[in-house]
Amino acid sequence: MKKNILLAILLITVTAMPLYAKKDKDAYEALKPLMEVYAIVQDSYVDEDKTSPDDLVTGAIKGMVQTLDPFSQYLDQQSFKDMNEDTKAEFGGLGIEISVKDGQLTVVAPIEDTPASNAGIQAGDKIMFIDGETTDGLEVMDAVHKLRGQPGTKVTITVQRGREQPKDYVITRAVIKIETARYSVINDKYGYIRINEFMGKASDVVLNAIGEFREKKIKKVIIDLRNNPGGLLDQAIKVSDIFLPNDKVIVSTAGRNKEKLQKFKSSDNIEFKGDIVIIVNEGSASASEILAGALKDNDKAVVIGTNTFGKGSVQTIIPLSDNSAIRLTTQQYFSPNGNKIHGVGIKPDIEIKDPVASSFSVDLLEKGLITEFVTDYLKKNPEGIDAAKKEKNGAKVSESDIKVFFKKSFDEKLMEDFAKWLKQKGEDVQPQEFSSDNEILAKWIKTEMALKQKGRNVSRAVSVENDTQIKRAMDILDTVSRLSRN
């Protein structure tokens, strides 16, 4: 009896379709097989416990939505509640943004200074298993539930990176505190802004940064968007607005009617008029791509790095009557020049790949040998990172030109000491990999040294100053500055 009543309700709902669709006849015909299958499953499926009306309707909705694209989802009541928590500045988990790409659960970006990034998870990594269970066909929100848990508990994810063999990462969950953005000054000459996510008040941090740069007469700025998975559209627009003159297109969005573009333009504000380089990579997505595209197309910045993720679509959360919801792709982003972002990404003006450490160097890091070496090094060389700073300030006046020319740099001596130390420990030093990873290893060692001596803030500054991409950005800013003066 209950079954017949539900079927009657479905029939009545379908005949009322003019409220929701103009072609109600076509909609009715299309829904007939669905109602037939519902009735057959209710009557004949072997396990009656799995044929409750709620379960069958939920399954039908999930199937309908997930066939649209990887970003459209059905959110049950718990998932909807969890999704609302994502806009807060603190939550428990690993610290990764995930999505489905080419049918596989994929890391969009690890969030800086979280268990995932500290464990070595990278943008583009394919998550094949979570605690031994396959992720094939797993929806994003279901994966989120599996990855989250009580702080201090562990989860094992099996990662496929490129053509390498799958590797297990055992990661301890922690409370994730997202620092949306931060800024600093490099060498008293370059302004550096790191935007981790376009959440909260990221635009306020950027505005404060520009104010401080102006006071210090800094006219060369680096905006680092690497591994920034995106965030809120309004924050991307507000940040773009800081760097653009009045009435410039920041981004356009279009829904089903592609001819009806909604354009977001810059306002009449105090525009930053210095030189800008933006650094992006495959982990830069969504709101990051809006900012990079806005400044690139309006000739306000040189974009360097590698092609971005290509997540240029707008998802609208539509609550349902039972406190569940659907996340539905309703619009797509277009850069100011009309270029589609979704599935394409932002192509940098200058392609510069961030050096990737070899398995040899990663192994040294994972064994804790970098930390152990720094501890031993500082016992013998208590000046530590200060010696590198003195070297940067120039050679002693008393030293002759020829002596300075042949004098080994701090980094050269440091790496020689590290190689000797590894051999004393019985490690098999691979000369080719050691040489090719020289810059990466030196950065890791100096960053750890600064952390032990000066704390986290100085350690971050040292990491930034020794970052290969940031060094290239500074060179490009100097070149752009010289060209603009000529």
Image: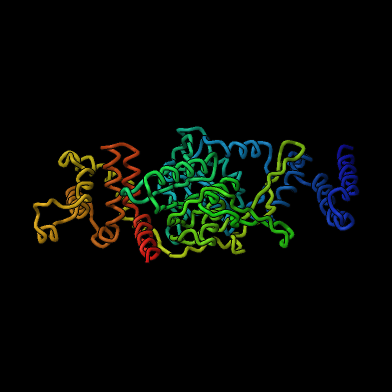
Picture coordinates of residue 217 (x, y %)? Answer: 37, 48
Left or right: where 456 falls relative to 23: left
Q: Identify the residue shown where x is 86% and y is 55%.
A: 22
| Residue 348 in the figure: left or right of residue 369 | right
Which percent across, then down, holds residue 134? Answer: 55, 50
Spot occupied by residue 139 in the image (x, y as percentages of width and height): 62, 48
222, 15: nearer the viewer: 222
Q: Residue 113 is drawn in which quadrant? A: top left
**Camera sees residue 132:** no
Q: Is residue 36 left or right of residue 335?
A: right
What residue appears at the point 28 percent right and 41 percent down from the top-left corner? 450
In the depicted structure, whether residue 128 falls above or below residue 172: below
- In this view of the protein, which residue sits in the foreground, 78 or 33? 78
- The residue at 43%/47% (across/down) is 193
Q: Is residue 13 visible?
A: yes
Q: Quadrant of the N terminus?
A: top right
Q: Is 359 rendered above or below residue 180? A: below
Q: Nearer the viewer, residue 338 or 118?
A: 338
Residue 198 picture location, percent across and down:
53, 45
Q: From the viewer's side, name the closer residue of 240 and 139.
A: 240
